[in-house]
Image (spheres, rainbow, N blue to C red):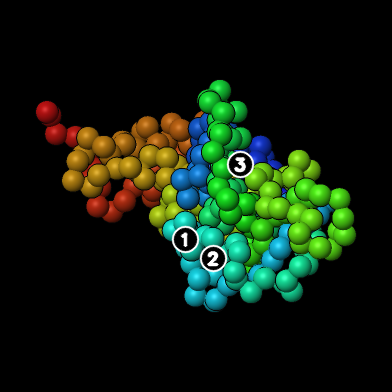
Amino acid sequence: MGKLFNLKEWLTVADAARHLSIVFDEEVTEADVLRLALDGRLRLSVNFVNGAIARCGRVSEELGKKVTEEGYRPPPKDILLLSASVELVPLGRVTHIFGLWDLPMIGNEVKDIESRFQRLTGGPSVLLSDFDGIIVNSRDNELCQIQVAWIEGDSEVAESYIAADRLPLDAVLVVRTEALREFERHCNNAPLPTSRANVSDKLAKMNQASMKFWSNADRDDRGTHPDNATVAAWLVQQGFSPTLADKAATIIRPEWAPTGRKPEE
């Protein structure tokens, strides 16, 4: 997606799948994106387009860092504490939240995403729910439990609401562009620039070729080492001239990978 990708704060799940398909040069589906989130490899977020009703509170800086940055999922008894006892807004009141929030995957949002994944893959219905409701978190360690109305009454009285077991229908699942960069960096096992504005298309393709052909190579097994001709042929398909492709394939080849003919088996 080039320059436009760098200007966006988030992508829809469909656009995130298309972006990853380009990055990894293989088909990535919406179901794949959801599976990566369920497996703790990619952070999902949600955009409350029309807002949502919630009970909110803050967690300690230490626990908040674990939840938001390390993908920590507390055991069930601690989830109950998070959703029910963590310095919630004044007792008896609810609040409205809007915009972009992350999914910490510690409550029933896991079941919601699993249900969506099963629908996309033709799997069974997800019947079980957590009592902790849908939990979302902000960048400053605020946790909120999404609520739904269950009796008519004062819209500001918490007794009129119960914990939601799924995200609102008008809430849109998204992936932050920074979360995609974190995932790519993890897969590539190398630092990525925060912006592609200063990276040429040729260099980006060389980085892609390096990950495609060398990320799974075993330095002690020459049978896993691609030859330069194979890498160069792929680069030619990406728009390199044959001469430039040959030079690029040589540059990409790790120093520990011997050149020349592979030994006979």
Using the image, determine if residue 215 lies above or below residue 83.
above
The answer to whether residue 130 is visible is: yes
| Separation of marks 3 and 1 at Cα, in angstroms | 20 Å
Q: Dot 1: within a 10 Å radius of its alpha carbon, few (fewer than 14), some, or many (20 or more) residues?
A: few
Q: Residue at x 38, y 39 (%)?
A: 213
Q: Residue at x 84, y 63 (%)?
A: 156
Q: Quadrant of the N terminus?
A: top right
Closer to the camera in the image, 161 or 7: 161
Q: Which percent across, then down, holds residue 172?
A: 73, 45
| Front label number (3 vs 1) | 1
Asked if the residue at tag 2 contacts the one at tag 3, i.e. Cβ–Cβ closer than 8 Å, the answer is no
Q: Residue at x 54, y 38 (%)?
A: 128
| Front label number (3 vs 2) | 2
Asked if the residue at tag 1 contacts the one at tag 2, i.e. Cβ–Cβ closer than 8 Å, the answer is yes
The residue beneath circle 1 is 77
User: Mark number for residue 112?
Assistant: 3
Using the image, determine if residue 230 lies above or below residue 100.
above
Using the image, determine if residue 101 lies above or below residue 42.
below
Q: Quadrant of the C terminus?
A: top left
User: Mark number for residue 81?
Assistant: 2
Q: Which percent across, then down, holds residue 203?
A: 52, 50
Q: Residue at x 76, y 59 (%)?
A: 159
